[in-house]
Amino acid sequence: MKTIFGLFNNATDDNYQEFKRLFYSWKQAGENERKECCKEFISFANQCDRNSINKSVYKDSKKDGSLYSNDVFGYLTKNSSEDIYTDSLKKVSEDLNRIWNREKLLAEFDSMVNAIPNHTINIDKNSSIKRNKLEDMPEIKISPIGKSFNVIAKLPCFVCVDVETTGLSASSDRILEISAVKYEEFNPVEKFSTYIKFTGPIPEEAFAVNHITKEMVCNAPTISEISADLISFVGNLPIVGHNIAFDLKFIYTSGIDLISNRKIYDTYELAKKVDKDLSSYSLTNVCSTFQITYNPHDSLEDSCATGMLLKAMLDYYIEK
């Protein structure tokens, strides 16, 4: 089976060869490289002769009947017109516009997060709390949300909570970052966010997810030092999170009980009611379904995204 690389070797037109190489690079690029590949392809393509490119494509297609099914141009030609040059440029341009639009949406989300008033965290150097055993943890009871759920009565205020950790085990892993965002009538009114001191090596698997480095946490306050202020910040308000049991387990084993005697709501459980056909119920995937664009695996941004997602799903799901 011939591939695009075989076509490269047979190409006689330098512009055609470069055109195909750049298109192939764009199609195979990862998320971080995609914008530059788009820009490079568009810049080069705008200098090419469209008719020459099209003629070269059809010349190669006669040599190799698999052109339209086995190489990158099959991606374009299967449901496109016969103008390969224009179709290529259009698809890459559309991709670049999507990237730029995502960057704009991310900037808007960051501006929203930055505009939320900061809670000045009271660090108590004399505070000392002991870790709890996971088996002693109170049962996490997720409060149900049905179609007749009275939003005004039950959720006038709440706190979204999220943690980033060194791993998945609440017993053996540790919190690296903790955030809580207070909402009133679904408007974020105050944010509590801090890295948590950790002196050991951060596992590569954790860094790959949350991008937290040892330098970020080595001089941060300990969980003991911020515990009293966190408990005061949350008060007796309902807690909201996405797969909230994960976060509450880590907070509990760290020595802080945010489970007992309060309402707890889970956007993960609500999402499974709202859309039963999603391929994944991760926070990023559910947010994408509701056009919420943000930087995932940052505890503050995750907390803000969860609050926005809760409102979006309730607006969609609850009977008016």
Image (tube, rainbow, N blue to C red):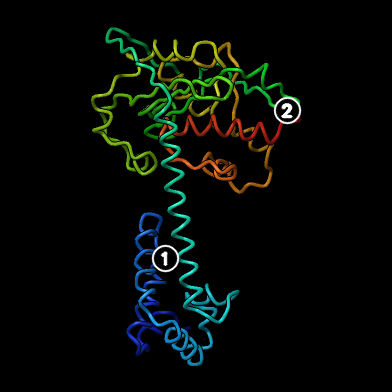
Residue found at x 41% / y 35%: 111
Whole-percent x, y for residue 213 in the image: 28, 36
Q: Nearer the viewer, residue 219 or 154?
A: 154
Element at label 2: loop
The amino acid marked with disc number 2 is: Gly
Whole-percent x, y for residue 54 in the image: 47, 84
Dot 1: few (<14), some (14–19), or many (≥20) neighbours within 10 Å? few
Q: Which mark is residue 198?
A: none
Element at label 1: helix
Q: Which residue is mark 1?
A: 28
Q: Is residue 99 above or below residue 114?
A: below
Residue found at x 36% / y 44%: 208
Residue 224 seen anywhere in this rendered image of the structure: no
Number of numbered discs on residues = 2
Q: Is residue 213 left or right of residue 190?
A: left
Residue found at x 47% / y 60%: 95
Q: Quadrant of residue 52?
A: bottom left
Whole-percent x, y for residue 228 in the image: 39, 10
Residue found at x 48% / y 27%: 247
Q: Nearer the viewer, residue 29 or 319?
A: 319
The amino acid marked with disc number 1 is: Gln
Q: Quadrant of the C terminus?
A: top right
Q: Earlier in the sequence, mark 1 or mark 2?
A: 1
Dot 2: few (<14), some (14–19), or many (≥20) neighbours within 10 Å? few
Q: Is residue 158 above or below residue 92?
A: above
Q: Which residue is mark 2?
A: 146
Q: Is residue 283 above or below residue 73?
A: above
Q: Is residue 105 left or right of residue 239?
A: left
Residue 214 seen anywhere in this rendered image of the structure: yes
